[in-house]
Image (cartoon, helix red, strand yellow):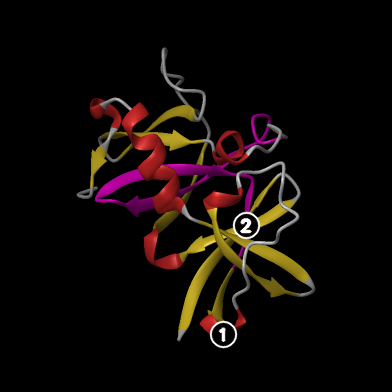
Amino acid sequence: MEKKYVIFKLNEDSFSIELTIAREIINVTSIKPVPSMPDFIAGVVHLRGFMLPLIDLKKIIGLPEGEYKKQKKKVIIVSCQKKIFGILIDEIEDIVSIDDEKLIATPALITSMEKNFFKGGFCLNENIILIIDLELILKQHIKHIPKELRIDNNL
């Protein structure tokens, strides 16, 4: 069976999520910090009358902060566990279709990042693209996000 994936950059590394949970990709120019939030919450942006919480995947999976604080920010709006969140990324690379037979297990060499946050990966143009398990990340971290910042799946 074939699935579609959105490939994006975090620093110089390429990652992906399943396209089925991605709702749209937006550019943001201003992120409003929210005091007393866990460090993986980058802040919120105003989107169609809602305050959309932004998750900084770099902090969750253990990557250095990198450059996106200095440039125009890109956000993938995702719908996961009946909630809407934005994930902060550096850039979108592609949307690809990958057959399940071509998926590989998460490489054993991953040590600096939390290995459990990946569903596996696939090879594309001689690069390994890891698939982020966003549902698992949100399940483990959502309890740290105040209810007033959680947007139900009606945006």
Can you give x and y, in whole percent of width and height, for residue 132 in the image? 54, 55
Left or right of residue 51: residue 43: right
Task: Report the predominant secondary structure element of the magenta stretch.
Answer: strand
Whether residue 149 is visible, yes or no, is: yes
> Residue 15's x, y, as percent?
62, 57
The residue closer to the viewer here, 70 or 151, is 151
Q: Which mark is residue 39?
A: none
Please identify the residue farthest to the top as the structure is shown.
35
Looking at the rendered structure, the kind of residue marked 1 is Glu
Residue 140 picture location, percent across and down: 40, 40
Q: Residues within 10 Å of mark 1 (few under 14, many from 20)?
A: few
Which residue in the protein does label 1 denote? 101
Which of the pair 117/14 is nearer the observer? Answer: 117
Figure quadrant of residue 44: top left
Q: Which residues are magenta?
A: 67-94
What amino acid is labelled 2 in the image?
Phe
Tell me: 83 left or right of 100. left
Q: Is residue 133 above or below residue 29?
A: below
- The residue at which mark 2 appears reads as 15
* Sequence order check, earlier mark of 1 and 2: 2
Q: Quadrant of residue 60?
A: top right
**What residue sits 40% from the left and 36% below the top?**
141
Q: In this rendering, does residue 77 appear at all? A: no
Identity of the residue drawn at 53% across and 33% down = 29
Which residue corresponds to the image point at 29% horizontal and 25% vertical from the top-left? 146
